[in-house]
Image (spheres, coloured by chain):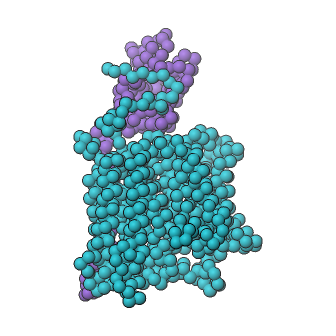
Chain colours: A purple, B cyan
Amino acid sequence: MPEFVLTVARFGFLILLWIFVFTVVGVIRRDLFAGGRTKSIVASPRGVGGAVLQGRPAKVKRGKAARQLVVTAGNLAGTRITLGEAPITIGRAEDSTLVITDDFASARHARLVPREGQWFVEDLGSTNGTYLDRGKVSGPTPVPLGVPIRIGRTSLELRP
Amino acid sequence: MSRIRGLKTRRNAELGLLVFAMLLVAAFGATVEANQFDEIRANFWVPAGLIGILFFGLHMVVRFTAPFADPVLLPAVALINGIGVAFLRRLDLENAIANKLAIPGFFAETSGRQLAWTLLSLILAAVLLLLLRDHRVVSRYAYTLGLVGIVLMMIPAVLPASLSEVNGAKLWIRLGPVTIQPGEFAKLALVSFFAYYLVRKREVLSLASHRVLGVDFPRGRDLGPVLTVWLFSLLVLVFEKDLGTALLYFGLFVVTLYVATERSSWLIIGLVLFFGGVYVAYLLGETVGGPFANFYDRAEIWLDPFAAKNYERESGNSYQLVQGLLGLGTGGLFGTGPGAGSPFKVPEVRTDFIFAGLGEEIGLFGLAALLIIYLLIVERGLHAALAVRDSFGKLVAGGLAFTLGLQVFVILGGITGLIPLTGQTTPFLSAGGSSLMANWLLIAMLLRISDAARRPANTPAERASGPKKAPTQLHGAMTEVIKP
């Protein structure tokens, strides 16, 4: 066989091999961007602290103890968890009390802890943050009744 | 199932990539024939076609049993497996020409056997996909699998050398003409066991006590499990005389532990323990000898393969390693071209040194592409681990993907002189049934987990499979779902 054909075959194979690699990368790329862009991320501007909550007394009904945690928006909308004494963990991890399938939720996203009749929400170092109404939760924050806790596309509320 | 509106199963992308991979295998075969026979015979495409049919079979199984599985895994592995078969075929052809034998048939010699092993492996993978519809089922048999893994791991160590030793490493079971490498299967069983165990114990193991240089270190009493596995892997190193296998078992545990607890201190502890242990074994080999002598020899060869005292040694000399390095060097940047090199100068070119033989012919440029394909396979495995929702699946997928990567690292590091050479097989590439079967089972498991990870919640398929069980994850809390 002429030398020329052999050289073409030799380099042609290598080039084809790399084209295969790039095709695979292309498929992975399309896969990465296929989902998760359908809706914009629900988030409030940064820097708005939990203190904002004090300015919204309209929805807050004081004097009643929370008995239920209700999912008001997201995949699990309609789920109710009866509150007891135990803390409630929220996240994508299978062992969370409330397992949410949300692209913007972390495995261990947030925790609700009761302390002397008052429930506190606490962010567990999630990637996209936990929001109490419009404010980003940075430390343990008391949760008034009826105020939405937002985790990704999921909203939760405490109900009497 | 792929007709569900709005859901991307990407099975057609998989099929397309598979066809592309088989074209590459055929191109490899054609170039080999052009170089070996000076002509491309009319039936050059048959090996690629045969193996392509096998992969197409598995593709159909995936299409029906794991429709949302990762589209890249199967074609990428198929390419490496196909190139392996094509390269073995090339060796058989050269062998036949050199010895003036008739051209071997497609089902003869090493490549024919490898083709048969591929068929068997793909059947096993398909059976796993068919039987195991939910990867979490495996966690029920975790302790059984753990026991099976440890037994498989220990069998070669306790067998007499005549039944288990090949080239100085005791990793095999030899039953007449059949040799099995039980360690390959032990890996899979151990990954499942480690994953289950660590899901249960991770809360304890992630407790921190000291903080040194910004890293939280675990409590002393929590070091028990990691020390046990460390001891086991050192026993493997000493009694099975194989560094690679020891590194594989221990690395597997440490990485699973790290994934489970998110504490980088475990990685530091693991690395210190392993390298400390290996160094002690090296020193003992120098002074005491006995069971440590083999490892000492390997380490000496690694430190200076070209030294006369290592090259001219009676047994266990550096001849293999040197020939492999020279082969890679001859290949240079672009290689001699498929079929144009002289891979028979490298000993064990069909198994341990297949990367050196292949490297001579496709050069650094081609090897880098193959390595990137390995990397992509591992990346897809880790991606499945990230995306899947249950902790057990995460740990299994992470552990399996890491094992595959570590195995490629161990053998390639050995051949290129980065770490002491050990007789690991190159996954999917080297001739050998055990390795091929075990690694295809691994891929089937990854396909199963990636299917679970990418499957949207509440697909019609899920609804069709009977009433949904009460979600066990809401343990403790009383829940009621109110229909709006």
Residue ID at (37%, 56%): B73
Which residue occupies 48% across, 36% down? A94
Task: Spot the residue most to the top.
Answer: A63
Quadrant in which the N terminus of chain B appears: top left
Q: Nearer the viewer, residue B398 or B160?
A: B160
Q: Position of residue A57 (x, y in %)?
A: 41, 15
Seen from the viewer's position, the closer of residues B179 and B44 is B179
Q: Does residue B354 lie above or below B63 as drawn?
A: below
* B205 versus A146 height, above or below: below
Q: Give the residue at the far front of this rendering.
A: B176
Which residue is pictured at 71% across the width and 65% down the height? B280
Left or right relative to A40: residue B281: right
**Count of picture labels:** 0
Q: Quadrant of residue B313?
A: bottom right
Q: Is residue A95 left or right of residue B111?
A: right
Q: Quadrant of the C terminus of chain B?
A: top left
Residue at 67%, 52% (x, y): give it. B228
Whole-percent x, y for residue A141 in the image: 50, 25
Mark yes or no: residue B424 visible. no
Residue B173 found in image quarter: bottom right
**Residue B82 rendering spot, x and y as whole percentages:** 36, 67
Q: Is residue A124 visible?
A: yes
Q: Is residue B133 above or below residue B301?
A: above
Quick one: B433 or A114, which is closer to the camera?
A: B433
Q: Quadrant of residue B7?
A: top left
- Whether residue B270 is situated above or below residue A39 in the rendered picture: below
Q: Could you say where residue B439 lies in the image, as x and y percent from the top left? A: 46, 59
